[in-house]
Image (cartoon, rainbow, N blue to C red):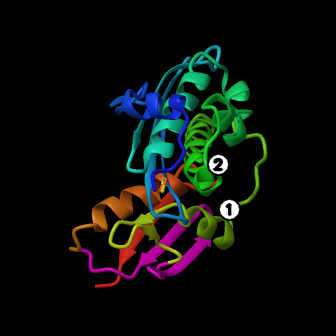
Amino acid sequence: MPLPYSELVMEHFRHPHNVGRIEDADAKSVEGSPACGDMVAVYLKVDPETHRIADIKFESYGCASNIATGSIITELAKGKTLEEAKGITWQQASEALGGLPPIKTHCSVLAVDGLQAAIQNYEERHGLVKERVPTTVEVVRKRLKRVMNPVTGLDVVRTKLVRDIEVAEGKVRVVIDLPADHQFAPSIREEVMEKVGHLWDVEQVTVEFTE
Ligand code: FES
């Protein structure tokens, strides 16, 4: 039975706004949903003076709800300051779309998480993080829960690919249980660097593979 999508959801799904990538983005995020294994990427261009979102684009590897939510939240975020955009919630996105079936809540949560992670990425890259929590093994592990294992579509922690994490004096070492010549090793390395490398007290990240 087809899901009862509103006309607005269908319209944003058929003709999504702000789809694509920004090659010279000031910040980006890739988030995956533990519920379904789908992914969304969000790219930002931010005015360095006003901290307004000058441009925003997204790529979705998710379903119609995810695409429609990505479309609506990028519209809501464009032109807003980072602080204002931080206030955008999945409930707002869902309301703006005329509602989503409850079974599809995680799809709009995924899109909003993508936006919030891109904002966080900008703040980390530009030294704007206010809460300076020291980086620990647990902080790194939490970050790695947002690195996808493309083999399974779930994150690298849940799929037990993280063999070891060490944190000492600004240096982070992550050992991934995959051969270095595995086809996904370069993208996992890049994702780990992206998620961990911008933490305020991290100076160096080393990603090692087991074979
Ligand atoms: Fe995965 Fe909707 S089912 S994003």
Residue 77, horizontal then vertical, whole percent: 60, 25
In magenta segment, residue 162: yes
Magenta part of the chain: 159-180
What label sits on residue 192 in the rendered view? none
The circle drawn on residue 135 is: 1
Residue 33 vs residue 168: left or right?
left
Residue 148 placement: quadrant: bottom left
Q: Is residue 83 above or below residue 63?
A: above
Q: Residue at x 54, y 66 (%)?
A: 34
Whether the residue under disc 2 has CB within 8 Å of ligand 1: no
Check disc 2: other Cα within 10 Å, few if <14, some if 14-19, many if 20+. many
Q: Residue at x 45, y 47 (%)?
A: 40
Identify the mark at residue 200; answer none if there is no mark. 2
Label 1, residues with CA under 10 Å away: few <14, some 14-19, many ≥20: some
Q: Nearer the viewer, residue 129 or 205?
A: 129
Q: Tags 2 and 1 in contact by the CB under 8 Å rule?
A: yes
Residue 109: horizontal and vertical position, in percent? 62, 49
Q: Amino acid at mark 1?
A: Thr
Q: Position of residue 116 (x, y in %)?
A: 62, 41
Question: Is residue 143 rendered magenta in the image?
Answer: no
Q: Residue at x 76, y 55 (%)?
A: 133
